[in-house]
């Protein structure tokens, strides 16, 4: 990322934008560059892709939690995610693409802290 010496307000905005996302931009860049069709990535496109991915994951997690079995224990399991992918039309494209990692349970407290 280029920092502009002529426009400190833009630098402050860039710093604020980086704080607005939780996913590592470098990882998203690596995933985007893994496509043979991508030769370079505009910084704005990278930021927007990262933010959109973050919002998608949050929406999937919240939908899965709200429709899942872990409300009582305040947890989200792989089976909750898989069930949401199968039962919710918006997430049908994920069916068959989810791979069960070991220890796939997380606390919803992580989304609020």
Image (cartoon, rainbow, N blue to C red):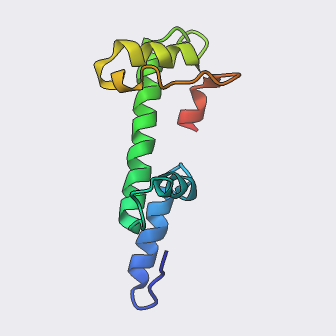
Q: Please, which residue is most extreme toward the left here?
A: 89
x and y percent of residue 64 in the render?
45, 19
Nearer the observer, 101 or 104: 101
* Quarter where residue 89 is shown: top left
Rendered position, 27 above or below 58: below
Q: Quadrant of residue 111?
A: top right
Q: Residue at x 53, y 49 (%)?
A: 22
Side (left or right) of 36 relative to 92: right
The image position of residue 92, as x and y in percent, is 34, 21
Q: Is residue 24 above or below residue 64?
A: below
Q: Residue pushed farthest bottom?
A: 6
Q: Residue at x 41, y 60 (%)?
A: 38
Left or right: residue 107 compared with residue 38 = right
Residue 113 is situated, as x and y percent measured from the top left of the image, at 58, 38
Closer to the camera in the image, 22 or 40: 40
Residue furthest out toward the right: 103
x then y, percent, for residue 19: 51, 58
**Residue 57, above or below 40:** above
The residue lying at 52 percent from left, 8 percent from top is: 69
């Amino acid at each position: 990322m280029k920092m502009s010496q002529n426009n400190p307000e833009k630098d402050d905005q860039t710093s604020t934008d980086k704080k607005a996302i939780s996913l590592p931009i470098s990882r998203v860049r690596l995933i985007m560059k893994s496509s043979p069709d991508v030769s370079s990535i505009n910084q704005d496109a990278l930021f927007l892709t990262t933010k959109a991915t973050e919002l998608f994951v949050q929406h999937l997690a919240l939908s899965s939690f709200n429709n899942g079995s872990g409300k009582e224990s305040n947890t989200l399991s792989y089976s909750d995610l898989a069930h949401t992918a199968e039962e919710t039309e918006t997430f049908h494209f994920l069916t068959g693409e989810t791979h069960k990692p070991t220890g796939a349970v997380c606390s919803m407290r992580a989304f609020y802290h």
